[in-house]
Amino acid sequence: MELYTDEYFMNEAMKMAKEAFEDDEIPVGAIVVCRNKVIAKAYNQTEKLTDATAHAEMLAITAAANALGSKYLNECKLYVTLEPCVMCAGASFWSQLGEVHYAASDPKRGFARFSEGLLHPKTKVHAGLMAAESKQLLDEFFQKLRK
Amino acid sequence: MELYTDEYFMNEAMKMAKEAFEDDEIPVGAIVVCRNKVIAKAYNQTEKLTDATAHAEMLAITAAANALGSKYLNECKLYVTLEPCVMCAGASFWSQLGEVHYAASDPKRGFARFSEGLLHPKTKVHAGLMAAESKQLLDEFFQKLRK
């Protein structure tokens, strides 16, 4: 039985998104996997850290580089519950991530709207896994915020 | 006599770039100015921190947000010695920087190559101040690296 499927890892990222939700942060979670091992987990902390750059992916990429002792993450996979923005796409470019898996799309600030060239040419992209669940959590968050 | 000109601030950023050079980092420096006061200074530390996201601008934006206690930097100006990359342009979008001043252009990874929409629509951009000096420092660094 193969436990470490993409579904398993995206679900780990979803757990982080739910932690963000509990902390009143925009619920986005990310994990970095290297050789089937989760080496970094993070969720969006822009409010807590008072830092507009503290997106889940940025924190996860920095933590993964620390864990590996390498700034390049060619053999790593990023699982994130929302399509990375331009900043996070740029971070994945510089860290040369092997794969990026994202759940929900972000038509407003997602990287794909701007240019495919924002990611590293060797980075493989997979979209849509658990997209509905991620979108539901985000919608719930913004509904709560408006109340 | 007006001391706090754009030239003065870009020269402060250049000093940071020179510190990066001394530390064997790609020589890029950045400062953030708020109401004529330098509130953050940083230089590229991707090697020292083993973190591909540790660009001068990212570090300066995070430090400025900490200094102000606000994740938005609408009243701030970023001075950086090299055209920001896509990641740093994205960071300046999220922090809503009032102005971005950069010295040398980066035709390979500079944000302007990709799309004007990468920056916040309210961010004013100024390019070219001390560009030759910045380019010379970068060229010198890469020549040294190749030896």
Image (cartoon, coloured by chain):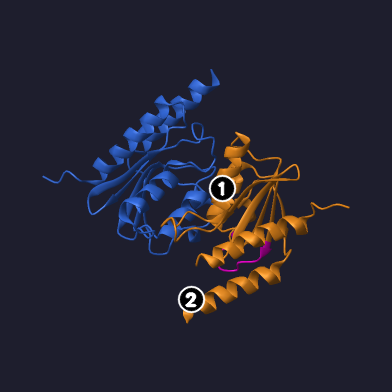
Chain colours: A blue, B orange
**What percent of the width, then of the height, locates residue A6?**
26, 46
Amino acid carrying mark 1 in the image: Ala
Q: Main secondary structure of the magenta part?
A: loop
**What percent of the width, then of the height, locates residue A95?**
41, 58
Q: Which residue is mark 1?
A: B91
Q: Nearer the viewer, mark 2 or mark 1?
A: 2
Stretch of the chain drawn in magenta? B103-111
| B80 sits left or right of A70 in the view | right
Amino acid carrying mark 2 in the image: Leu
Asked whether residue B110 is drawn in magenta, I would say yes
Residue at the far top in the pictured view: A147
Q: Which mark is residue B35?
A: none
Q: Which quadrant of the view contains residue A138?
A: top left
- Relative height, residue A120 to residue B143 (above, below): above
Q: Which residue is mark 2?
A: B145
N-terminal of the pair, mark 2 or mark 1, is 1
**What percent of the width, then of the height, locates residue A112?**
49, 52
- Residue A83 seen by the camera: no
Q: Residue at x 65, y 40 (%)?
A: B73
